Amino acid sequence: MNQMSTLAAAPSFDVERIRADFPILTQTVRGKKLVFLDSAASAQKPRAVIDAMRIAMETQYANVHRGLHWMSERTTDAYESVRDQIAALLNAPSRDEIVFTHNTTEAINLVAHSFGRGVLRPGQAVIISEMEHHSNIVPWQMLRDSHGIELRVAPVTDAGELDFDALETLLSDGAVGLVSITHMSNVLGTYTPAARVASLAHQYGACVLFDGSQAVVHRAVDVQAIGADFYVFTGHKLYGPTGIGVLWARAELLEQMPPFLGGGDMIASVSFERSTWARVPHKFEAGTPAILEVIGLGAAISYVNEIGFAAIAAHEQSLTDHALAVLSPIEGLNIIGRAQDRGGVISFTMDGAHAHDIATLLDRNGIAVRAGHHCAEPLMQRLGLDSTARASFALYTTHAEIDVLAENLQRVRTFFQ
Amino acid sequence: MSAGNTTFDDVRDLYQDIILRHGRNPIHMQRLEQFDAAASGDNPMCGDRCEVRIQYGEGGAVAKIGFDARGCAISMASADLMVEAATGRTAPEIHALAADFKTLVRTGHTASPDPALDALKPLSGVSEYPSRIKCATLPWAALVAALEGATEASSE
């Protein structure tokens, strides 16, 4: 690479220009400037996403895969082109491996149902980790109870990292059919070394699923480089609308799996005696899909691609480093999780102040954080906590906002002393 | 005791001194070793939990109430103030007081003439914070469940 191209590839980031793309960020809350530090729960939407959905409704909307008319054909084209965008986003080998769901939860339920009941055999095991969101726990418990699958839980270390020795022990009897694990913890911010997990799982004959709900937002994901078998994420954390999620799986797995929901769009033909299924991925997409939300997600992906994941990751790494530096010295404040490789999700507790009280006080000054168990109750139990407060960052977060958070946490501390 | 941090002045309606005091050092947080009924309530949204144990005395009145809880300042203070307001009352009186209290924290006021409500009025500020109302009502739900012979408060 010559010097010119190195310069061209260097991440440049104008956060104020980016903030101008998000109309909601100019809002005030309780008379204060909104400081939105809850993007890990759901991210705000850029104008490009809002406009794409509105323009589709105003100019180019009909049902997809059905009509022989102009509107339906245009809508189908717009809708299906997002499948190509997602395949590119994940570096999936084929667009036909991209299945639209309504969110991550539904995508994992799809895998638990179709792969769990259709491919795994009773007596086999599924491994999850201690730092999973409820959406990557409960579907496997339901599979365990209905299909005789054993559910094993890989521990995390006190630093909040996956315990690889323990994971290998859990894999060692060869009974494990699937390792289903977060790619980035929504509580601790820990990144899972995905390629290492995949390689270890494969060594013992297990497939591997990554819950990319958090990870896909912050870094470029390459499912082939990781060696993943399944990858799932949701649109609304990636600056897209709610109601649209994605399952990517290797084609041969999707071919082996029976359908999830039955109905229109997922069939080849239907008679009262029997029905046959549409080809993959449509076999898994019953009913009229979330057409506008898919179009919105496509706009969101275009938006982040235009900024580029190198620039986004560099900005957010800088935010995270800054946050750790300014929050750590606050007396009585405890940052939960100290993983080496972590992203912009920081959970904390404060001596003498419950997470809810922290959140309420911050809210009075326009600062939005999450407080509670973050849909990860077992992790809270593992950490010996009832709840934490959590600040999470996005591409539109500024260093100044983190300073405002730190300043206000200092005041919260004084308030409850 | 921090009374006045000017920065958060506008939350003093919620976090009055009496709430901060009871929230920090709840006087009645104790597990009664001897009890006639006990019930727990939990708030699945946040993981707060409160167990209430009661002892009946002469004439069916509740002679003693103790609680064991984990939660925010609002829920701890509410549990502590509840013990003071409800002790010595009969089950029907406590049911009525619980209903009045619920009205108080949902609307900010109550028309009930019950003098016990005076001590609970510092919690009326919760009505301005819809996501926090359940913090205040959780211990009452556990107490009412214990009076009804249930072991778990029904979630509202």
Image (cartoon, coloured by chain):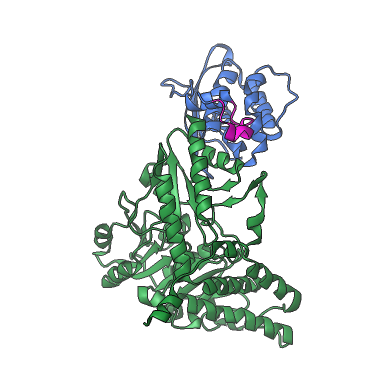
Residue B106 appears in the picture as rendered: yes
Relative placement, left or right, of A189 versus B78 is left
Q: Quadrant of residue B101?
A: top right
**Residue B99 location, x and y as percent?**
67, 29
Instruction: Reply yes or no: does residue B99 show up in magenta.
Output: no
Quarter the N terminus of chain A occupies? bottom left
Q: Quadrant of residue A143?
A: bottom left
Relative placement, left or right, of A113 versus A172 is right
Residue lying farthest to the front in this orientation: A3
**Residue A19 location, x and y as percent?**
59, 61
The answer to which of A5 and B22 lies nearer the viewer is A5
Relative placement, left or right, of B85 versus A125 is right
Residue sitting at x 47%, y 83%? A94
Residue sitting at x 24%, y 59%? A165
**Residue A11 location, x and y as percent?**
46, 70
Residue sitting at x 54%, y 45%? B45
The answer to which of A1 and A95 lies nearer the viewer is A1
Residue A212 appears in the picture as rendered: no
Question: Up-down: is A290 above or below B155?
Answer: below
Q: Which residues are magenta?
A: B3-16
Tell which chain the image draws in green: A
The answer to which of B109 and A25 lies nearer the viewer is A25
Tell which chain the image draws in blue: B
The answer to which of A165 and B67 lies nearer the viewer is A165
Question: Up-down: is B126 above or below A375?
Answer: above
Instruction: Reply yes or no: does residue B6 show up in magenta.
Output: yes
